[in-house]
Amino acid sequence: ASSRTPLMAGNWKMNLNHLEAIAHVQKLAFALSDKDYDAVEVAVLPPFTDLRSVQTLVDGDKLKIKYGAQDISAHDSGAYTGEISGPMLAKLNCTYVVIGHSERRQYHGEAEETCNAKVRAAYRHGLTPILCVGEPLEVRKAGTHVEHTLAQLDGALKDVPAGQAESIVIAYEPVWAIGTGEVATPEDAQEVCAAIRGRLAELYDGSLADQVRIQYGGSVKAGNVAAIMAQPDVDGALVGGAALDADEFVKIVRFRD
Ligand code: PEP
């Protein structure tokens, strides 16, 4: 993982209002220094309603922290009540957008076709997808977790050209490890992250596969992040619960210490 800059991204899910968001990002900004940003890319993924406040803070204080959204509409504008479009997120200077989080797949029925449309929407507007893939518990028990995860990857990347896919971030998040406190072993994470990189080499080429960052997500904490990051194909973490505690998230960013 040495040639790829690790990406530590905090997925706040449906937590922190815009005032709490400002306080939280200020805490992160106060704790993090250039030394941290040189070693690791740091991003927060707040609810939509926080993004304008985060943008104002990041711009005003010239913070090196990146930010993005947790979802995007597949459509660019129009009669899609409740949706948020790529142009809106681009206007807020979002860098990233999470696509296909397991909670979207589970509670909103998002499957491959939707994820693919959202990946293409993100690229239409210069946003970098953090594409989440990963198997539920029954698939893990059946031993078909690699096939399951790679099928999600294939579906989401359909007709996405190399010139776009080269910047994608993939988050391998086994569903049974998300918010459960049950973390995959470093070897479990490595197995699937390596398979994802292998499939990227097949879909595109080896140099693209080598460049793409693959995160692990699922109950990452300060206490387990170093062992996961020591795996050769793990290039960062998508952090849910532990990202809501600024001190804990800073420790995750400093996983090498
Ligand atoms: C997530 O929301 O993507 C996640 C991995 O959550 P947690 O860290 O709480 O398991």
Image (cartoon, grey):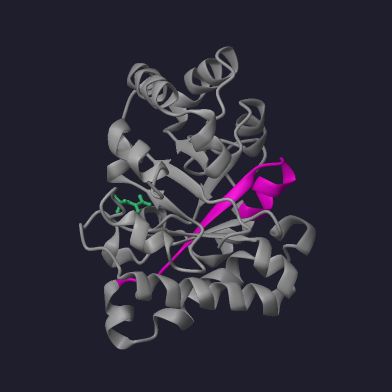
Residue 212's place in the image compared with 199, above or below, is: above
Residue 83 visible here = no
In magenta stretch: residue 126:
yes
Residue 207 placed where, x, y %?
74, 69
Residue 151 as seen in the image, left or right of residue 179: right
Relative placement, left or right, of 216 versus 89 is left
Looking at the image, residue 161 lies above or below residue 61: below
Most foreground residue, 231 or 54: 231
Check the image and report above or below for 204 versus 118. Answer: below
Give the magenta-colored segment's residue range: 119-136
Is residue 207 inside the magenta stretch? no
Relative vertical location of residue 245 with respect to residue 189 in this rendering, above or below: above
**Image coords of residue 22 (percent x, y):** 40, 18
Which residue is painted at 27% across and 78% down in the image?
138
Horizontal side of residue 157 vs 236, given as left or right: right
Name the residue located 64 percent from the left edge and 38 percent from the top edge: 86
The percent coordinates of residue 4 (x first, y second) are 61, 56
Kindly tell me whether residue 237 is visible in this rendering. yes
Residue at 36 percent across and 75 percent down: it is 188
Query: Whole-percent x and y of residue 42?
Result: 50, 39
Q: Quadrant of residue 137?
A: bottom left
Q: Residue at x 59, y 72 (%)?
A: 197
